Image (cartoon, rainbow, N blue to C red):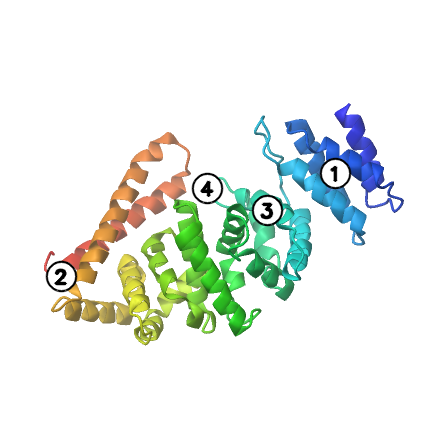
Amino acid sequence: MLRKVFRALSAIFSSRSRSIQTPSALRALQLVTRLAVSDVSNASYELFKKVMASDDLTDQHWEAARLAIHGAFQDNAEDTPPTVGEPKELLKFLGYHLGLQGAGEDHGSSINFALDAIIIRSSGYRADPLTVEWISNFNHAGPSFANGMRSIMHPDNTLNLRLAATGLMGITSDQWFDPTVPIVESEGMSEFCEHLATFIIDDAPNGRFIQMCGVAVLFGMLRSPEWRKHIVTRLWSLLAYCTQIEEDKESFRWCLRNAIELLEFTRGLPDGEGMKWWYGTLWFHYDKLGTTARDEVEKIAEDMSLGDGILDLGLYLNLIGQEIARTRQEVDQLRSGKRSARFGMELRSRLIALERNHRRLARITGGR
């Protein structure tokens, strides 16, 4: 029965059809997508892709797409969400509705479904390589897309929607904060940073995913001369999770290559938080710094150890020690076989580097 229903709906809403029988077809789709079972989820996703295949969608097609995406990715009792593969239809849907969201229309629930479907399949060690490739090549830095994402981060929006948006920004931070492509005006940057801080520091559930996304966004901002000027004080403490950044991100590599430039920038900030946390980040990644940056980092530590700065050095030692303990535990769990051999080698190499960085800082501070 379900197959017959969806075959009929597909014929009506396919890209070749322009004689949509509304409102009966939309009503039928609305009713059938309420069934939270895997057959409906998979059939809804196939219908969604057929609707989105056209380059000339009417308002009725967009409504059908919204209903179909709800049916595809709603929580269902059988817990078997559709396989996404190439997410081109999801990205097209997301781009259109973010444009509407930025213009003042509320499509938060539909955007949330699209974001969740994309993020779940593009992050972590089980990420779908095909999904990741499509997301990497998609233009996330267009003005309408950016305005929609900024509007989503407003505190009035739901926690889940803001979490999903932060997840996408974490994955695509190199594009979002590309210093060569300014897509947000200065006032918008300030508002965005305030809203991001409110979400991550005050509202979001504490956990590794939000830490990874938050620190990726912060590194992206640091690479941009414009964005970094708008980083609010509360965001700097996210650098306590600096080891959770994906080290192949261009923003991360740029920041370490330009460590002294960022030291000078943070030194000039009035509250001291930027300098405190950026300098600590350099000790976490001391092994990746060039000779000049290492010399400067060590000189600063020697000066700090002679005064009140010893308290901050002790904080860095403690945080690095905690990360060493966490990484050791993760290495011990590699026997479960859930991670690749390459990941295991990378993790062990990172553990060795952290231990060396910790010992070096401990020697400078006299073992305190």
Q: Residue furthest right?
A: 19
- Front of the two marks 3 and 2: 3
Residue highlighted by disc 1: 47
- Front of the two marks 1 and 4: 1
Q: Earlier in the sequence, mark 3 or mark 1?
A: 1
Q: Residue furthest front?
A: 156
**Image disc number at residue 112:** 3
Q: Residue furthest left?
A: 366
Secondary element at image label 2: loop
Q: Residues within 10 Å of mark 2 (few under 14, many from 20)?
A: some
Gap between marks 1 and 2 measured at Cα: 63 Å
Q: Earlier in the sequence, mark 1 or mark 2?
A: 1
Residue highlighted by disc 2: 365
The quadrant of the rendering that contains the C terminus is bottom left
Gap between marks 3 and 2 measured at Cα: 48 Å
Q: Quadrant of residue 139?
A: bottom right
Residue highlighted by disc 4: 125
Residue at the image point whose x is 45% and y is 73% from the top: 225
Q: Earlier in the sequence, mark 3 or mark 2?
A: 3
Q: Position of residue 78 (x, y in %)?
A: 58, 26
Q: Amino acid at mark 4?
A: Tyr
- Front of the two marks 3 and 1: 3
Gap between marks 1 and 4 measured at Cα: 29 Å
Gap between marks 3 and 4 measured at Cα: 22 Å
Side of 96 relative to 287 (left or right): right
Who is closer to the viewer here, 189 or 14? Answer: 189
